[in-house]
Amino acid sequence: MKKLACLFSIVLLFTACNESKTVKFSGTFSGERFKASDTLYLFGVETGHFAVQDTLLIDESGFTVTIAVNEPSIFAIGKKYPENQCYLVPGDEVILDFEDTDYKIIQSDNIASMQHFHDWKGFLNEYNKSIGRYTDNLNTEYKKLVNFPVGLTKFLQNIPNNETYRNFFKNLSTLDQENLYLRVLTNPIMRFPAKEDLPVFYRNLYEDHKYVNKALQRYPMGLVLAKSYLRFALNYTYDYSNHPSNHDYTEIFLKELKNLGSEELAAELALEELVNRKLFGEIFLKKQKLYGPLLKTEDQIKKVEEYIAENITPYQPGTPAPNFEFQDTDGNIVTLEDLRGKNIYIDVWATWCIPCKYQIPFLETVYEEFHSDDLIFISVSIDKDKDKWEDFIAADPHPWMQLYAGGEWYTKNQDFFDFYKITGIPRFILIDKAGKLIMYDAYRPSEEDLKEKFEQLNL
């Protein structure tokens, strides 16, 4: 039973040729990593990331397959993941010998370019393995990169005398370097120091339309790089983390998506904004109007429709809100039923949550302007340590109701947290006098939309 194998060509430079070309690709196994009983996958790039394109059937001697390759390309082979990346040129006949952890190039008409690419990936992987640790501070991470430019320069100086590969590698190495450096700030956690504390490399990293003509959607780490770059731009070009109220996140994000120069990547990232950020209700529907036109495929549109069916439709305004039983500062139990007859703006927060505490001054302003007998404000803390919550609100008291929902109270109110799908804070909720939803996911105090909503409702 023979399985077909094909390669989705990965183009980092140039536009597609009309003439279809092929590469005869063979692999032998001198090591123990691959066996005849294994399933071996061929990986290509789909919208900036590796994806399985097909399956190879291997035997004791290895495998041989003819691959459609229209341009100088990168492909990868592996059992579960793309373990080995290789550089291919149309019309070549390539034989690789797969050892226990690596491969050797046995035959190729472009062996110098293939070897240079292979060595570059080995050099880069050593850095990729060492950065991105929770336990290492940023200064430690920066030090790991000190010698990277020296190594990069050596690779650039030793590019084989091949103009096609020279252009290919210059583009590739630029993207690889930027992806590596941005990983330090965004993976596994996002850490954005003051701009003046950044090493020199980062200070001129942002450029308008930076990746136009870079074929980012066909770079194997293109999706990751695009997301890291957008986060970098938000923090250092727009200073969004420090002053989110001064900027419209959606407006910034849309502008930078279009600046990527790839409609395919913009569509994938727009889809992530819609379905992965756990937006709900009116907030989601507003963003859908802006991001929806960027979607490119039926599958993307279907995913949004499925998200709406699961996360938007069941929580429309007028849906009964679940009851809760939280504890106030005097130890009394407060329920939703106790508050019937009043509109309620709920703030779910914790003392350890920096974005939550950022909202407090804005909440003070909104409270002073809008609180009344008809509209009350409640902050619901999910701190596990009740003493820390009590100390915090005692040191910085506010006139609105403070309730505790941490520890055992979180468990007692699991239905409340499950109903609102609270996986991140701060989270804001607006409930009417009858105990029904006005906004399942309400605007934040720092957003002008909240004041407009209160005014629209005559609150």
Image (cartoon, grey):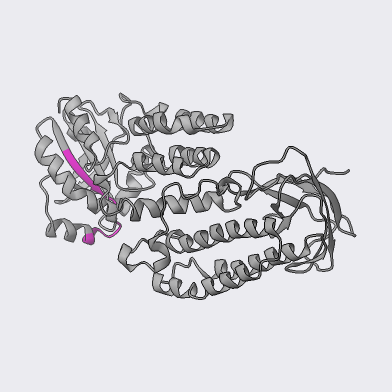
Name the one closer to the observer, 158 or 310.
158
Q: Nearer the viewer, residue 389 or 92?
A: 92
Question: In x, y percent, where is residue 337?
Answer: 22, 33
Q: Is residue 331 left or right of residue 251?
A: left
234 with respect to 304 (left or right):
left
The residue shown at (42%, 50%) is: 230
Does residue 28 lie above or below 335 as drawn?
below
At which x and y percent is residue 68? 78, 44
Q: Residue 380 in magenta?
A: yes
Q: Quick check: 20 above or below 158?
A: above
Name the spot of residue 291 as percent of width and height, x first. 43, 34
Q: What is the total number of numbered labels drawn onto the structure image?
A: 0
Numbered range of the magenta stretch: 377-388
201 within the magenta span: no
User: Residue 31's x, y, as percent?
Assistant: 81, 68
Residue 10 in sight in this render: yes
Q: Is residue 453 left or right of residue 374?
A: right
Which residue is at 22% across, 57% downward?
389
Q: Quadrant of residue 368?
A: top left
Q: Quadrant of the C terminus?
A: top left
Q: Could you tell me if residue 332 is visible in this image?
A: no
Kindly identify the residue that appears in the image at 66 percent across and 70 percent down.
158
Quadrant of the image containing the N terminus: top right
Which quadrant of the view contains residue 113?
bottom right
Q: Is residue 221 above or below residue 451?
A: below
